[in-house]
Image (spheres, rainbow, N blue to C red):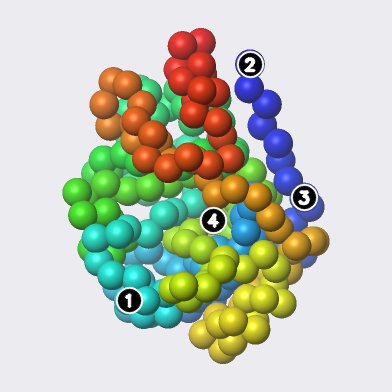
Amino acid sequence: MTTKILLGLPPETDQIKRAAEVVSAGGLVAYPTDTLYALGVDPRRDEAVANLCAIKERGVGAGLPLIAASVDQVERCLGPLSTLGRKLAAAWWPGPLTLVFAPTVMLPDAVHASDGSLAVRVPARMAARMLAAEAGHPLTSTSANRRGAAPAPDAETVRSELGPAVQLVLEGQRSLEGAPSTIVDVRREAPRLLRAGSVPWEHVLQSTRV
């Protein structure tokens, strides 16, 4: 049996709504996740994605991870998960486990990895889930920093490092810390570890046997 930890109370509802409006207009917001701050844009909008990649100095082929409000939003907006993906989602979502899968919906090239896959998770932090729910679709969730800089652990660091490039920063209750999410490829019958992180690999394997 796995335990899902739901982190923190969300910012005020009107702040979530304002952030969703910024995203819907093609803008960039920063928001707290399970560990550190992330940068969110509408991954369906070419210009918003290009702006995010320019700020991050991130090239096409690396892909941009996404967060969603729920499994239903993932499958409705991006495509169905595999049987393995659904099993791991049931065990670990909401939580810091990112699943790499083959989508049926195509987004701008920079969002996909070079093989066309997408990386997505439903985060434990309520504010992030509420933002994706209010936006009505998944959002990008790449770390809030420029290339070579450390990921931002709090709203003040986001403002200091990125300044006016970010139109709105959702306030977190405290400075964030911790390992990044564990990334697992679920496109085959057996899971494949792509990045070690918050969820130990042996726990991922154990949850596939339950």
Residue 104's x, y, as percent? 24, 44
Q: Nearer the viewer, mark 2 or mark 4?
A: 2
- Which residue carries the number 2 mark? 1
In the rendered image, the vertical position of residue 54 relative to residue 200, given as above or below: below
Kindly identify the amino acid type of the residue bearing the numbered disc 3.
Gly
The residue depicted at 75 percent of the width and 62 percent of the height is 175
Q: Specify whether residue 167 is in view.
A: no
- Between the C-alphas of marks 1 and 2, the distance is 41 Å
Q: Is residue 180 left or right of residue 187?
A: right
Kindly identify the amino acid type of the residue bearing the numbered disc 1.
Ala
Kindly identify the amino acid type of the residue bearing the numbered disc 4.
Ala
- Which residue carries the number 4 mark? 132
- Which residue carries the number 1 mark? 50
Question: Which is more N-terminal, label 2 or label 1?
Answer: 2
In the rendered structure, find residue 8 and report the number of the disc placed on it. 3
- Between the C-alphas of marks 2 and 4, the distance is 27 Å
Give the crowd class for mark 2: few <14, some 14-19, many >=20 residues within 10 Å: few
